[in-house]
Image (cartoon, rainbow, N blue to C red):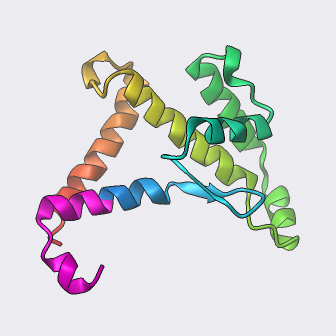
Amino acid sequence: MTPAQYSNLTTEEKFHKHAKKFIEERGFLDEKGNRIILIDPREKIFEEFRKLQIDTSKMTIEEVKKALNDKYKSFDQRMLLNYLAKNINHIPSERCSFLITYISFLEFYLYDYDYDKMPTDVQNEFKSYKDFTEQLKQIKY
């Protein structure tokens, strides 16, 4: 899209363009160099859980979140430096961080994006994302 085309978009269209970019940028590179993003098919994303040896089939969302957080915390600085020294483009902690975000968006969906139905911890996350999108809407494009 050229700058002239962009300037002809309505504020709402510009917001949707930025929101789409936000969602598409929430991702990471897997071992093969493929970009995994939030709107990828469910099967593809759950394969990433299996790569971390997290079997989500018999877990609650809370158990999955705990397992992801535990995995994330287990990646220490030495491990990160080792990956970078080997020139590996994907970093396991990025996979965990992405999957934590994915689970958050899944929770929002399960509560029909209804703030009042959500438990407090989910409400806090939802409010953070909602505040961010409200700030995006206020930007003069």
The quadrant of the rendering that contains the N terminus is: bottom left
Q: Residue at x 66, y 17 (%)?
A: 59
Q: Residue at x 41, y 22 (%)?
A: 110
Q: Position of residue 108 (x, y in %)?
A: 39, 29
Q: Position of residue 41 (x, y in %)?
A: 55, 41
* Left or right, 118 with reference to 88: left
Q: Residue at x 31, y 37 (%)?
A: 127
Q: Position of residue 23 (x, y in %)?
A: 42, 53
* Left or right, 132 with reference to 138: right
Q: Nearer the viewer, residue 85 or 20?
A: 20
* Left or right, 86 with reference to 107: right
* Left or right, 94 with reference to 141: right
The quadrant of the rendering that contains the C terminus is: bottom left
Q: Position of residue 71 (x, y in %)?
A: 74, 38
Residues drawn in magenta: 1-18
Instruction: Examine the structure image and report whether residue 11 is included in the region drawn in magenta.
Output: yes
Q: Residue at x 78, y 40 (%)?
A: 51
Instruction: Examine the structure image and report whether residue 22 is included in the region drawn in magenta.
Output: no
